[in-house]
Amino acid sequence: MRAAKILIVEDERVVAWHVQEALYKLGHHVVGIATTAKEAFQYALDQPPDLVLMDICLQGSSLDGVSAAEYLYLQLDVPVVYLTAHADQHTLRRATETSPFGYLVKPFQEVDLHSTIQIALRRHQLEQALKAVQQWYATTLISIGDATIATDVDGFVAFLNPTAEILTGWTQEQALGAFASQVLDLVDEDTGAAIDNPILAALCQGDTITLPSRALLRSRDGSVHPVGDSASPIRNRKGEIIGGVMVFQDISDRRCQEQTLQKQNQVLEQSQDQLTAQLWEQTVQLQQAIACTQLLKRVLERFASQSAEECAEEPSFNSVSTWVSRNSVLHLLLQEVGQVLDVEYCWVALQDADQRFVTIAYEHRPTDRGCKRSAIGEQIYLEDFSRFYLRLMQHQFWINPSPEVLPSLYQSFLDAKSQLIVCPIQDDQRVIGEIGIVMRHLSTQSPLQGELIAQTVNQAAIALYQTQRHQAAQAQVRELQRLNVLKDEFLQALSRELRTPLTNMRMAVEMVQRIAQMLKTSSLQSMHPDATEALWGKFDRYLQILQQEWQDECELVNNLLDFQSTAALAQALPSHSLYLQLWLPEVVNRFQEEAKRKQQFLNSRIADDLPAIAVHSPTLDRLLTELLKNACQFTPPEHVIQVAAQAHGGQLELSVSNTGTELSSAEQMQIFEPFYRSANEGWSGFGLGLALVKRLAIALKGQIRVESESNQTRFVLTLPITQDLA
C-alpha cells in the first residue's frame, strides 16, 4: 500500500483525532487537521496533500465542505473524499456535482477507509495520466499551422484547430457534434455547385481525397475562401476506419499573386489628356451626386418592402422583434451604400454597451474588385485612437484622415489610390458605431463631394432607425389586438363550459322538487306500486344527474385552477428518486376497475433496464392520471389501453395509447389547446385536461406529443433521465 499525504478537514476534534489515528495505522501521513475551509486552503498551499478527507458539513464558516472541496479539486487539483453523518438533500446534491472521489459515512471501519483512499488515489492518478495524454494530442493538433478538421466514423466533427475556426467561422464548441458537410461548406468557384465533402468521401472510399483546384470554402458568415489540400481516413492499429481528418490551407494569397501576374501581362494603353481627365472626374462627381439623392429613397423603399414581407409571413410581434434584433437595418443600409456608390469596400463597426471598443459586424465586398480578406469580428479599442473617435462622438465625419489618426486596421483596407469616408451611426442622439466607405473615384479636390456622401449615409441610417421603430410599434399594436381577441375567446369558452353543468343541475333540482311535492301531496298507500316505483326511479335518476354534473363542474374548476397555477409556476419543482417499475403499476391499477366496467383492456409495459429518475412524483402522477382518464373515457369497448415506459436516446418515454380512435393531423395540432372540442365522435369532450397535461409536462422540463394513425392514438411524454445520486 502506498503511503499518502492526507489532509483532514473536520470541525469536531474528537472525530478528527479518530480519523488521524486510523490513518496512522494504515501507514499514511497526516499533513494537518483543519477545522475551517480557510485553514484547509492554507494547508493545501503550504503542504500540498495527495488526498483530502472533507467533512461535508463544516460549522462556523462561511464556506461549507462542498464549496471547499470544489475549490480544492478545480483550482489545486487535489482529490476529495467526503466524510458525512447526515446532510440535507440540497447539500448532498451539491456535493455530487463536485465529482467527489468517494464518500465515507461516519462512523466508519478502517477497512472502508483503506479501500476508499486507495480507490480515490488510483482514480486521481488515472485522471492525471489521461489529462496529460489528451493535452499532448490537443497541443499537437492546435500547433499545426494548417487548418485541421477531424471527424468520427459517422462524419460528425470531433475537433477543429484555431486556423480551421478562423476559415470556417465555426468555433470548436459550436462545431462539435455537427455534420462535416455543415461545417465544411465547399462549392465550385466557377459553377457555384456544392462539392462533395472530401472527409465523407474519404470515409466511404477508404483513401485520400484531394480537393478540386477551384474549390471555395464558404464560411459561416457568408464569406468565401479558396482552399486546397486533401482529406484522409483515420485508421486504428487493426486497419479499421475510426474517423477522418482534413488538412487544408487558405490559398487566397496564391490566387492573388496569380491574378497580379495576369494583370501585369495585360498592359492597357491609356492616352488621356488633362481635359479628358477633368471631364471624366466631373462626370463621376455628377453620377455620385445623383446616386446620393436616390440613396435615401431606395433604402426606405427596400426597408418598407422587406418589413412588410416579414410581417405578412409572421405577423406576431415576437417575429418582428427578432427581425429587428438582427440589425438587418444596418446590413440593408450597407448593401445599398455598396451598390449605389459603387464602392471598393465598405463596413459597419458597432460599439459595445460600455463604449470601450468597436467590432466590425458587417461588410460589403464586391466580387469584381479583387481579393480582400474578411474583417468580420475584428475589434478596435477607442482609447487607442482617441483623436479619431472623438470627432465621430461629436457627430462629425472623416474624409481621408491622416495615417497618424486612422486606426491601423482601417489603414489595411486602403492602397495608394483609395479614398476613405468614415461616418458616425447614431440611434436617436447616441453614437453606436461607424460606417466606413473605401472608394477610388472620390475627388480629393472637391471636399463637397465627400461631405455629400457622408451626410447622405448618415441621414439614411437615421431614417432607417425611425422607420424601424415605427414598424415595431405597429407590430406591438397588432399583437395586443390579437391577445385581446384570444382573451375574449377564452372567456366565452369558459362561460359556456361553466353554464352547461349549472343548467343541467337547475333542471334536475326543479324535477326533484316536483317529485318531492307529488310525494307530499299524494298518499303513497293509494298509489299503484308501479307508479310509486317510477317516481322513486325518476328521483334517483335526477339525483344522479345532480351528482354527475356537480362532479363535472368541480373537476372543471379544479382543472382551471391547476391550469392557472402551472402557468404561474416560476421555480423548478423539487424532485426525488423514483423507480417506475414500482410506481407505475400502482397508478395503472387505480383504473383497472373502471376499465373492466367499460369492457376495456388496460395493461402496462415497462422496460426492465429503466434507471431511477429524479422527478416531482405528485406532478407526474397528476399528468398520468389525466391521460388515463381521457383514455378510459374515449376508448370504445373491447379495445386496448396500454401504458408503456422505456429509455430512448438518453430520455424517458412514458406513453398512454388506446385503440379504436384516431385523430386527424389538424386535430393533433390543436389537441392541447384549452377548451378545444374535436369533431371526431370518439374524442368529443375536451376541456382543460389535455391543456393541463401540457403545462404539467413543461413544469417537469419535459415535452408531450400526440401520435394518431391506423385506428390508434398515442400520447407520449418525454422526460430527461436524471439519476438522483444523492
Image (cartoon, rainbow, N blue to C red):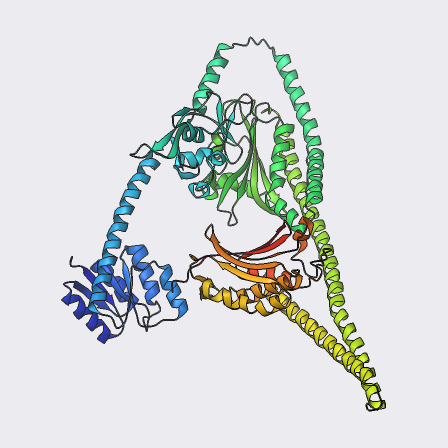
Query: Looking at the picture, how far across and down is residue 663, in whole percent?
Result: 67, 52
| Horizontal side, residue 3 vs residue 62: left or right | left
The quarter of the picture where the C terminus appears is bottom left
Q: Indicate left or right for 482 with 638 as reference.
A: right
Q: Which quarter of the picture shows residue 694?
A: bottom right
Query: Could you say which is closer to the camera, residue 8 or residue 494?
Result: 494
**Residue 717 horizontal side relative to residue 164, left or right:** right
Question: As rendered, which of 450 and 459 lies closer to the eye?
Answer: 459
Give the image location of residue 137, x and y in percent. 30, 39
Could one spot residue 538 in this view of the protein?
A: yes
Q: Position of residue 79 (x, y in %)?
A: 27, 58
| Residue found 67% across the figure and 54% down from its top | 670
Quarter assignment of residue 140: top left
Q: Which quadrant of the rendered structure holds the N terminus?
A: bottom left
Front residue of 470 and 221: 221
Q: Is residue 451 visible?
A: no
In this picture, is 135 found above or below 699?
A: above
In which quadrant of the rendered view does residue 146 lie? top left
* x 31%, y 70%: residue: 58
> Which residue appears at 30% of the width and 43% of the height?
135
- Vertical arrangement, residue 588 with respect to residue 286, above or below: below
Q: Position of residue 370 (x, y in %)?
A: 52, 22
Counting every numbered tag in the picture gives: 0
